[in-house]
Structure formats: C-alpha cells, structure tokens
Image (spheres, helix red, strand yellow):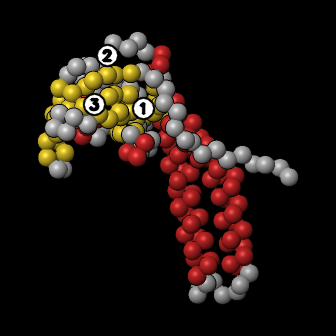
Amino acid sequence: MEKEPITIEGLEKLKNELIFLKEKKRPEIVAAIAEARSHGDLKENAEYHAAKEQQGLIEGRVLTINDLIARANVIDVTKIENNGKVIFGSTVKLKDLETDKKINYKLVGQDEADIKKNLIFFKSPIGKAIVGKDKGDMVAVNTPSGEKNFEILDVEYIYIFFYMFRWENKKS
C-alpha cells in the first residue's frame, strides 16, 4: 500500500466529508429507499433505482475516503525549514514571462486539488515542473496549449485555510 502525501487541511477536509456522508447522506438515502419501496413494484420504480444508484455512489466515496485516510502521509510544511525550494505543500508565487501575470499555487495531493482555489496536484504539469526548483529559477512547462515559461518569485511554507465544509449532527 503506497502512502499518499496530503496536507493537514486536506486530511481535515476528507475527515469532515466522511462524517457528512456517514451521518447525513447515508440516513437520507436509507429513508429514500424505504419510501420508494413503499410505493410497490420495484421493477419499474424510478425513485427506488435512483436512490440505490445514489447509495452506490456514496458508499464508493466512503470507501475511497477511508482508503485515502489509511494511506495518508500528512505533510506539515510549517514545520519544515524554508530554504526556498519548492516542495509538496509549499505555496509558490509564479510570474508568467509572456504576460507578466502573477499567480500563487499551493502544491497538494490529487484529492485536494482545486484549480479554482489555486490548489494544484503536485504531479500536474506545472507541479512536476516546479518541484525541486528554487526561488528565482526559471521553469518551462509543457501544457496542452503549448510551452509556458515562468519565474519562481517566492516560495512559502505556510498554512492556507480554504473552505472546508463541516457538518455537525445537531440534536434538537
């Protein structure tokens, strides 16, 4: 079983999602299946089949999350001395040399990646190109739209909080 690198916040997000699926979504699906069964003939019962399909998707995701948590190799970059080298979990400020546009990326695990939040998979084309490089280095990245050239302006080993949904079972 190969360990999977993950950030602290990525692990927390997975744990919260697992709680949400087990404590909120599972009971909802069980109730939906029970309701659909009460309508009679299951062969042509679209509600029943949709609920069973949803149940399969949720159970598959629960298994995936459990596997990811079991294989997690949690990396806390705030505890690593910053020597300016790009590593997993670091936040990197890049400058596109063609457009002069500056962008920050945080290198994360596959399940954490979200380009809308500038969280990129460390094995993505950009991730692979910058890992191991130093502040001030120039890098060329082969992308589907052609080669892009960047300068690494800064490398930080910081914790970046991003929205993690949290569901808590509220007793009424």
Q: Residue at x 62, y 77 (%)?
A: 48
**CA distance for labels 2 and 1:** 20 Å
Mark sitting on residue 168: none
> Which residue is labeled 3 in the image?
94
Residue 118, above or below 91: below
> Can residue 122 be seen at all in this image of the molecule?
no
State the residue in front, 114 or 50. 114
Compared across the picture, whether 60 is left or right of 100 comes to right
Residue 159, above or below 43: above
Q: Residue at x 32, y 35 (%)?
A: 103
Point out the tag, 1 or 3, that comes first from the N-terminus.
Answer: 1
Residue type at mark 2: give it.
Answer: Gly
- Local crowd at mark 1 within 10 Å, few (<14), some, or many (≥20)? many
Q: Secondary structure at mark 1?
A: strand
- Local crowd at mark 2 within 10 Å, few (<14), some, or many (≥20)? some
Q: Secondary structure at mark 3?
A: strand
Q: Residue furthest left?
A: 147
Residue 169, above or below 93: below
- Local crowd at mark 3 within 10 Å, few (<14), some, or many (≥20)? many
> Can residue 9 be seen at all in this image of the molecule?
yes
Choose top left, top right, bottom left or bottom right for residue 89. Answer: top left
Point out the tag, 2 or 3, that comes first from the N-terminus.
Answer: 2
Given this view, does label 2 or label 1 mark the residue nearer the observer? 2
Residue type at mark 3: give it.
Answer: Leu
Mark sitting on residue 5: 1
Residue type at mark 1: give it.
Answer: Pro
